[in-house]
Amino acid sequence: MAERNWPPLPTSGFISGAPATENDLQAGDAVFVQAAGLVEALNILIPQYGWLEDDAGSERLMVVVQAERSDAGEILGLRDFDGNEFVATVEEVRLVGTKGSDQ
């Protein structure tokens, strides 16, 4: 497989190890806040690359900046490289780690 020039992962602007708070959201470190019920951080590496599949079946490269589990399920906060934010379930995202590889 040919090498890709993947954009670098951010060094800030993400949250790991704890559910996001309103302060995290206001600071730009989170994409969403879950206020009701039991919420906990998912044990996955943040930040990392992920492919988000859209309704047409195309994949877009994203950075996973947040990962939480609640009564609503396992949810990820993502950003594309233009700064647009997305929320998706774990099932909608193919996590590919920090090395910029499809393997």
Image (tube, rainbow, N blue to C red):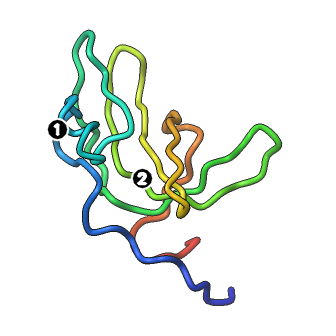
Residue 93 percent across, percent down from the top left: 56, 46
Which of the marked residues, 2 or 1, is nearer the chain's N terminus?
1
Residue at point 42%, 65% (across, down)? 97
Disc 1 target residue: 18
Residue 45 percent across, percent down from the top left: 30, 57
User: Is residue 72 found left or right of 45 in the rendered image?
Assistant: right
Q: How crowded is mark 1: few (under 14 residues within 10 Å), some or many (20 or more)?
A: some
Residue type highlighted by circle 2? Val
- Relative to 58, residue 90 above or below: above
Residue at point 68%, 89% (across, down)? 2
Residue at point 27%, 10% (across, down)? 36
Residue 9 percent across, percent down from the top left: 38, 70
Residue 64: image tag = 2
Which quarter shows the C terminus?
bottom right
- Relative to 25, residue 78 above or below: below
Q: Residue furthest front?
A: 26
Residue at point 28%, 39% (across, down)? 42
Q: Residue furthest top?
A: 37
Residue 55 percent across, percent down from the top left: 77, 37
- Where disc 1 sits, the SS reads loop
Which quarter shows the N terminus?
bottom right
- Say which quarter of the image contains residue 80: bottom right
- Say which quarter of the image contains residue 8: bottom left
- Relative to 96, residue 89 above or below: above
User: Is residue 95 found left or right of 68 in the rendered image?
Assistant: right
Per the model, the C-alpha gap separating discs 2 and 1 is 15 Å
Q: Residues within 10 Å of mark 2 (few under 14, many from 20)?
A: many
- How many labels sit on residues? 2
User: Is residue 9 found left or right of 86 in the rendered image?
Assistant: left
